[in-house]
Amino acid sequence: MANQGKKILIIEDDFFIRELYERQFNKEGYSVSSAEDGPTGLVLASQEKPDLILLDIMLPKLNGLDLLRTLKSKSETQNIPVILLTNLGQESVIKEGFDLGAASYLIKAAYTPSQIIDEVKNFLNDSQQTPAS
């Protein structure tokens, strides 16, 4: 499987959503870890150096935008692509997410789980073919 060895970190406080995506990505051959809050996600991102982070914005203890800001400010995590996966669709929040360095922004309610999987696959495949600068 082409996805073998690719690591995804899911930072999502909703147990059902987190488990759903963990199962789906595991079925696709990805190595998946998850966190239910911002501080745990930050520790896992630093320790595991995933190939991609799926990040919710509404998180306990440390919200997703603050977590994104922290991830992008640390040398060990600044180059990990982050896709915001949230139900917050306000233009100002989307703009802030991109300004902070998000690679993409997906509204949960607008995508089925299989569409999210496809978006992640496409993103990882595209980034693999783009030479690092």
Image (cartoon, rainbow, N blue to C red):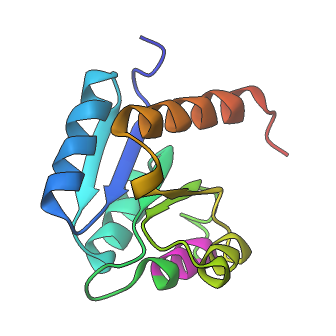
Q: Which residue sits furthest top?
A: 1
Q: Residue at x 23, y 69 (%)?
A: 13
x, y percent for residue 87: 42, 67
Q: Which residue sits furthest bottom?
A: 61
Q: Residue 34's image quarter?
A: bottom left
Q: Which residue sits furthest right?
A: 133
x, y percent for residue 29: 33, 22
| Image-based side of 120 in relation to 60, left or right | right
Vertical placement of 100 versus 132: above or below? Answer: below
Q: Residue at x 63, y 64 (%)?
A: 102
From the viewer's side, name the closer residue of 130 and 23: 23
x, y percent for residue 44: 32, 62
x, y percent for residue 19: 17, 47
Q: Residue at x 39, y 20 (%)?
A: 4
Q: Which residues are magenta?
A: 67-73
Q: Residue 119's image quarter?
A: top right
Vertical placement of 38 versus 87: above or below? Answer: below
